[in-house]
Image (spheres, coloured by chain):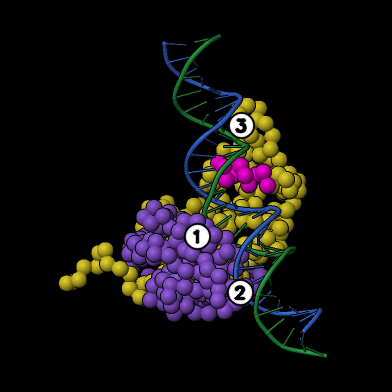
Chain colours: A purple, B yellow, C blue, D green
Amino acid sequence: MATSKRRSMPTRRELAIWRGYIETYDILRNRLEARLHQDSELSNGDYRVLLALSEAEEHTLRSSALAAHIEWERSRLSGHLGRMEKRGLVRREPCAEDARGSQVVLTDEGARAFRASTVPHLQAIKETFLDAFTDEQLDVLGEATTALRAHLGLPPVTAAGGSPRVEA
Amino acid sequence: MATSKRRSMPTRRELAIWRGYIETYDILRNRLEARLHQDSELSNGDYRVLLALSEAEEHTLRSSALAAHIEWERSRLSGHLGRMEKRGLVRREPCAEDARGSQVVLTDEGARAFRASTVPHLQAIKETFLDAFTDEQLDVLGEATTALRAHLGLPPVTAAGGSPRVEA
DNA sequence: CCCATTTGATTGACACGTGAATCATCGCTC
DNA sequence: GAGCGATGATTCACGTGTCAATCAAATGGG
């Protein structure tokens, strides 16, 4: 073809698809976060931390291991744990093997809050997102996501650890 | 069928698709934001504000009109304008017709910054997102988005105002 | 054994987002 | 034209996110 497509600007149609994708996502995410918060007094971040601790041995993880598991910056986790600790969802203890370290422990209250949140949250995901699509649409969505992840150089979707996660 | 699907929990496959969608989106968004910031020293929010002002009569809008146009909370816009004003991208003037009001004006520097950012930004959208898909995939993505928006009770994607927007 | 480097974690400064409270002005009604 | 509710905008308190700086403990090389 005469006019190369490389380095060209997006077409009007492409931009509309882009905008639809990005804007709709934002709204979806906000609604789910709002609903989680309303149902359970938890933010996405709280949920993510609680899930990781729930699945951990003894409901405990080293702070750095937790950060790695949920793919957060350490400073982000630090601040978040501080807020969660104030609310009694989590406790921090000095670490026996490494005096620098910090052991994050799920409290009973944290476990209770998490347990209470999960069913409504999964149902919200179903009602808000999954129920919007036919089975075929879900398939193509999955394929499109796979293509996009490959394009971005990301690994295939993490093998789900039995439970859901709400946030990247 | 014997087992009703209503109110049931998501299947493993559904959850994987959900997680792929949501996690991939976050990464995509962060990458584009980082690139915009790196190329142009602008955040998504800055871009959005500058775009709206660029397209406005006299490069000026009432603060409330601007907030409505880009669908932001007024307090959000207020804070953001404060930061942009400090950087010289924008100016606030008292409003002649309504002494309560505030007139937001694009400065020359703001106009220059916006102009310089748009081509690289559109190319980043193309390279990062659009180029990941075949034409057919773009179509089905668009359809899926339409279905999701309908499910969420949202209006169809806004008729694009000639120029792109990065954020909802 | 001591010191330099690395590592675990926190802190501080800032950008960004939301919702509630504030405050002045506007415009309507009497 | 005095009062009063609606409206335009900002401010405050807080949660959330990034990055750079800090600081103590661990650790490996001489």
Q: Which mark is residue A85?
A: 1
Indicate yes or no whether the magenta region holds residue B84.
no
Q: Are marks 2 and 3 on the same chain?
A: no
Across and down, in percent, residue B149 comes to: 41, 57
Across and down, in percent, residue A68 comes to: 55, 74
- Residue D30 is drawn in which quadrant? bottom right
| Residue ID at (69%, 40%) | B105
* Dot in front, 2 or 3: 2
Q: Which mark is residue A99?
A: 2
| Residue ID at (67%, 43%) | B82
Q: Amino acid at mark 2?
A: Ala
Q: Main secondary structure of the magenta part?
A: helix
Element under disc 3:
loop
| Residue ID at (65%, 35%) | B103
The answer for how far apart the CA atoms under marks 2 and 1 are is 20 Å
Across and down, in percent, residue B139 comes to: 46, 68
Q: Amino acid at mark 3?
A: Gly
Q: Marks 2 and 1: CB-CB under 8 Å?
A: no
| Residue ID at (39%, 61%) | A109
Element under disc 2:
loop
- The residue where tag 3 is placed is B101
